[in-house]
Image (cartoon, rainbow, N blue to C red):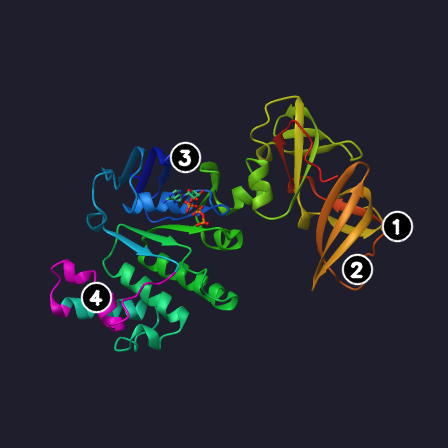
Amino acid sequence: MSAVSLTNIVKQFGTFTAVHRMSLDIAQGSFVTLLGPSGCGKTTTLRMIAGLLDATEGEIAINGKRMNDVPIHKRNLGLVFQNYALFPHKTVAENIAFGLNYRNVSKEETQRKVADALELVQLPDLGARYPKELSGGQQQRIALARAIVIEPDVLLLDEPLSALDANLREDMRVELKRIQQRIGVTTVFVTHDQTEALAMSDQIIVMSKGRVEQVGSPEEVYNSPASEFVAQFLGASNILSGTSLGIQGDELGLQIIDFPRLVIPRSRAPQITGVGPAKLVIRAEKLHLVPKTAPADDRLAVAATVENVDYQGQSARYFLRVGNHALQAINMIEDHPFETGAQVSLRFRAKDCSALPGGTSHDAQ
Ligand SMILES: Nc1ncnc2c1ncn2[C@@H]1O[C@H](COP(=O)(O)OP(=O)(O)OP(=O)(O)O)[C@@H](O)[C@H]1O
C-alpha cells in the first residue's frame, strides 16, 4: 500500500489552476522530493497532503485511507516549514513535547520521547533553552525533532533548509537524510534546488506549471530526462535537433547535422519509437574539450570553435560552435584553459547522450 496516494488532484484558486490533475503514489519509507521552479505548485500540493488546503477535485489517501475530509490534526503528520515557527515562550523541550500533550502520553513517556528526539537531532543538552538562544540550524533541528516525536505516518518538509546559509545547508542535508533513514519515516520534501533534490531523494517528482513532468530516481531524471524542461532544469543541457534513424535491438541511431552518426542506448530514449525528428540531449559537463591536434581516443569527436569562456574558479563554461549549433561545455581547468577563438576537438561518449522526440530546434543560436 502507498503511504501517500494522490488521484487526479486539481487545485484552483478562483479561475487559476495551480495543480492540474496530478496523480502520484509515494512508497512507504521513501524520501520523495517535489522539485520545480517557483510557482509550479509544489507547496500547494504539499499543503493539500497536509490538510492545510482543500483539493478542488480528486482524492488524497494516506495509508490507503481517504483523507480529503479529515482535518489536519487527525492526519498524523509531521510538518516542518522554512521558518521554523517554534513557540518563542516555550523551552526547547516544551516545544518538542507540544504534539505529545494532545495525545494522552504520560509525563514520563513524554520526557523519554523528548530526550530521544533531542538525541536523534544531536542536541541532547539544549532542552532547557529558549528558541531565541539557538542558532538557525539548531532551531531547524528542533522543529524537526518536534515533527518526528509524534511518530508521524508522513513527514512533510517545505524548503526546510532554505533559510540556512550554504555550508550549514549542506550539513543539514546529510543530517536530515540520516535521521529519515534511521527512523524510516515516509518523507515528502519540497525544494526548488536541484542539487538538494539529487543528493537526498529516492524519487524526484519534477513539476512545471502545476503538472508532473517526470517521476524517477535522481539517476533517471538526471540521465534520462523525459522532457526538455527536465533536461534544462536539472543542470545545463545541450539540446540539438536532428533525426532518429530508427531502433535496432537495444540501440537507437541518431543523425545530427555536423556531428558523426551516433548510436545511443535505447534505454536513454524511451519515448522514441522509430524514424523521425528527434533531439539529442547531452549535459554540458559531459562534453570535453581537447586540443584540435590531440590523438583520437575511444570517444566520439567533433571539431568546435570556442566563442566565449566564462571562468568559474576551478572550472570554466565554454560557449562553443559546431556548424550551426551553439553548445555549452563545463570543464575543469587543469593547466591552460582554452581561449576565445580556439579551434578544439570536442570529445564525448554515446552513453552520456539521451534523446527526445523532437520538432522545432531549441539550439541557442
Ligand atoms: N492562496 C492563493 N491564492 C491564489 N493563488 C495562489 C494561492 N496560493 C498559491 N497560488 C498560486 O498557485 C501557484 C502555485 O503556488 P505554489 O506556492 O504551490 O508554488 P511553489 O511551486 O511552491 O513555488 P515557491 O517555490 O515559490 O513556493 C502560484 O502561481 C501561486 O501564485
**Extent of the magenta region:** 83-108
The answer to which of marks 2 and 1 sits earlier in the sequence is 1
Crowd class of label 2 (few under 14; some 14 to 19; many from 20; radius 10 Å): some
Q: Quadrant of the C terminus?
A: top right
Callout 2 amino acid: Pro
Pointer 3: what residue?
17
Decide whether residue 85 is among the magenta residues.
yes
Near mark 1 (Cα within 10 A), the count class, few <14, some 14-19 or many ≥20, is few
User: How many angstroms separate mark 3 from mark 2 (CA)?
Assistant: 48 Å
What is the C-alpha distance between the residues marked 2 and 4?
Answer: 57 Å
Res 5 seen here: yes
Residue found at the very far top of the displayed protein: 275
Q: Position of residue 44 (x, y in %)?
A: 37, 44
Task: Determine the image quadrant of residue 230.
Answer: top right
| Residue 159 point in image, percent of width and height | 42, 55
In screen coordinates, is 91 left or right of 101? right
Identify the image quadrant of the N terminus: top left
Task: In this rendered view, identify the residue nearer to me: 356 or 299.
Answer: 356
Does residue 297 appear anywhere in the picture? no
Q: Which numbered dot is residue 337?
A: 2
Q: What's under tag 1, amino acid-wise? A: Thr
Q: CA distance from mark 4 to mark 1?
A: 69 Å
Q: Earlier in the sequence, mark 2 or mark 4?
A: 4
Label 3 crowd (10 A; few <14 / some 14-19 / many >=20): some
- What residue does disc 1 label? 293
